[in-house]
Amino acid sequence: QVQLVESGGGLVQPGGSLRLSCAVSGFTLDSRAIGWFRQAPGKEREAVSCISSHLGATYYTEDVKGRFTISVDNAKNTVYLQMNSLKPEDTAVYYCAAETALFTRCVLSPNEYNNWGQGTQVTVSS
């Protein structure tokens, strides 16, 4: 059974850091790309970052590039999102998701992901 479980969210001041974790079970991370998405109140879910371990490739949206880092621990079958220099506009529920297709590059549309975690709240506020 495929399962993704996020953790690590919380309240942080502007300029602070958080590390989100996505523990994956039911498949190995070298077979499917994993994406991080976020959804703020009243807004659509948007892609933040993605990693395809089998291709050794990562992707970041422009507004998080240079601040966020995605990584994989294959031994723990866990994907991390290190978030630094957080801004109030980063406030959202963050989700990790597994891309439906196997052994493909990262794609940005949430419609291409069929396994999702429950989400973790990130609030950036002073």
Image: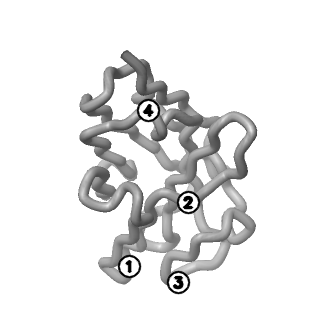
Tell me, for residue 73, which label it has, or none. Answer: none
Q: Which mark is residue 47?
A: 2
Residue that label 4 marks: 88
Crowd rating for badge 3 (residues with CA inside 10 Å; few <14, some 14–19, many 20+): some
Q: Secondary structure at mark 4?
A: helix
Q: Secondary structure at mark 1?
A: loop
Query: Is mark 1 in CB contact (under 8 Å) with mark 4?
Result: no
The vertical placement of 112 against 80, above or below, is below
Mark 4 or mark 2: name the one nearer the start of the chain.
2
Q: Which amino acid, mark 3?
A: Thr
Where is residue 56 shown, x and y percent of the image? Answer: 30, 78
The residue that appears at 50% across and 76% down in the rendered structure is 106
The amino acid marked with disc number 1 is His
**For the residues marked 1 and 2, what is the alpha-carbon distance in whole angstroms?**
20 Å
Q: Nearer the viewer, residue 65 or 109?
A: 65
Q: CA distance from mark 4 to mark 2?
A: 17 Å
Pointers 1 and 2 in contact (CB under 8 A)?
no
Dot 3 or dot 4: first in sequence order is 4
Q: Which residue is mark 1?
A: 54
Q: Helix, strand or loop at disc 3?
A: loop
Measured along the vertical axis of the image, is residue 53 above or below residue 26? below
Q: Which callout, 4 or 2, points to the residue nearer the camera? A: 4
Q: Residue 64, percent across and down?
A: 37, 55
Front tag of 3 and 2? 2
